[in-house]
Amino acid sequence: MRVLVADDEKLSRVSLISMLEECERDISIAGEATNGEDLLNALSKMQPDVAFVDIRMPKMNGLEAIERGRKLSPYTQWVILSGFSEFDYARKALSLGAFMYLLKPLGMEELGAVLDSLFTKIDQTYQRLDDEFEHYILAALNNGQSPGLAEFVSEARYTKYKVLLIATDTHAFPGQMEQAKHCLYRAIQEAVSGWSSLTCRVAIFTLTSGETAVAMCWQEGEPKDDLQMEVMTDSIYHRINRLTDQRIAYTQVDSSIYTNIGGMLAGLQDIRRLLPLRAVIGINHRFSLEELQKQPPAAAHMGLVMTKLVDDYHHHLYMDYCRELEEITTLLRTEQHSKQQIKHMRSFIQYGMNDNAELETVELTTLLTRHADKLLTDKKKLEGEPPDMISEVIYSIEQHYASNISIAQLAERLRITPNYLSSTFHKKTGITFTKYLTRLRIHRAKELLSTTNLPVKDIALQVGYYSTRHFVKLFIESEGCYPTEYKKQARL
């Protein structure tokens, strides 16, 4: 917690700073001010978490400084210190948004209680700002635009941006995959813990394509934050690397540092486009975006075909798999690939298709052909067994409920008609596709209402509804109350 102390009496400042240092809490003194004008200048430069402000100071009293200072540092928490207990002072201070009005002299026990409350309040502010940052990014990625992004850019003082993307390669079952993602998310949270502040934001989110992203922004002119960012990104990689086992591999790609959020979003899209290269240059590694951009087009193309092939295998798409296999066979015959690249491709197959047998001795195309035969055999077993087909549909819904998913898209992927899929889904689940999707979205919305401070319109967007009015209507039909009412009840 970064603290600014404003008091025209040097003894008062020294005394308070000494008490803050003795509190044995994570507190740093951002600066001091001796009058109202100094306070405003310090606020603009330092953006402190907390400002302890004396009421009576020369040039501009504390209340006037707060009124003007809120615009310069809108998220700073204000604590008024005064030797006067007049009700009008306290009322004016609270009306200006002051966190607390304290009377001098201040005791250690009282200060400790105030600091505990401040830490809780500040943590909530950090979380809200991180959630806001995440919302703008997701909205921009999903819709090509982000409501409020222009305002965020114009108001924010953040001048450095960076993003990491982490791909998960596994042959684990959907349930195991969800557990793996949970462990990944927790490891990242541990690595970034304590980095968020009024001058730094961090967002962790999952893309519709399955990768996990970590976006960061911070202010120019804070050398320690640059260093902390490097330490944090190193820590993320080391933590997720320890999660790797025989079933799951993680690959991290770090972007450059950008000077605006648009550059970061473009960098994120570049990483997504080049991420299939991991199939050729190695999974379970950490790369920079620049390293991926230096790879030859032939490697990028092979990586793309390899990742499509593994995806086809996971979704039992035999004909698509065979098409990718034919192209890979041609590429291996007509283009030169190093022994190291072939080794990386074998490893990619091992994790993506659960193939541990004879990886070093059997030709790559022979291995892939064996999987084609297995895929055909499994597909024949699946024919006439709609429950497995419906399980795949349900899994797709759970993964992509926030996007514009439709039964027609899923039917096309499964090579069946929408009417057949719709009737089979209803028969096996007892509910229509639309109602199932709505229930899932409403369930996720309830989680967000209970655990975040996001406004209703943002929650609607995150669960797949671009019309807030339509979302509210469906929520009332499902829960019998407005989303805002549900939020209040959930937090009682």
Image (tube, grey):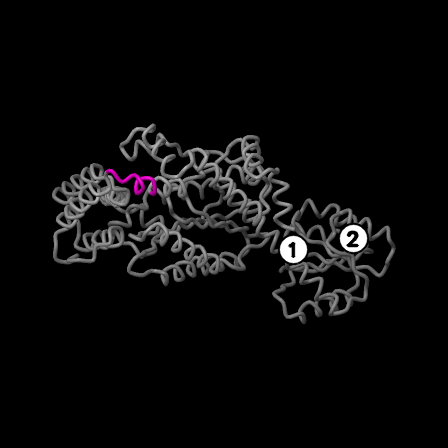
> Residue 338's spot in the image, x, y percent?
17, 52
Per the rendering, the mark at residue 19 is none
By secondary structure, the bulk of the magenta-drawn segment is best described as helix
- The span shown in magenta is 384-391
> Residue 65's spot in the image, x, y percent?
76, 49
Between 112 and 34, which is closer to the camera in this rendering?
Answer: 112
- Crowding near the residue tagged with mark 1, few <14, some 14–19, many ≥20 C-alpha atoms within 10 Å: few
Left or right? Give the position of 389 relative to 260: left
Q: Earlier in the sequence, mark 2 or mark 1?
A: 2
Q: Does the segment drawn in magenta span residue 51?
A: no
- Residue assigned mark 1: 121
The quarter of the image holding the N terminus is: bottom right
Per the rendering, the mark at residue 62 is 2
> Residue 312's spot in the image, x, y percent?
26, 41
Left or right? Give the position of 132 relative to 370: right
The furthest residue to the right: 86
At x 48%, y 48%, the residue is 161
> What distance separates the C-alpha of mark 2 from that of mark 1?
22 Å
Q: From this viewpoint, is residue 297 visible?
A: no
Query: Which amino acid is tagged 1?
Result: Lys
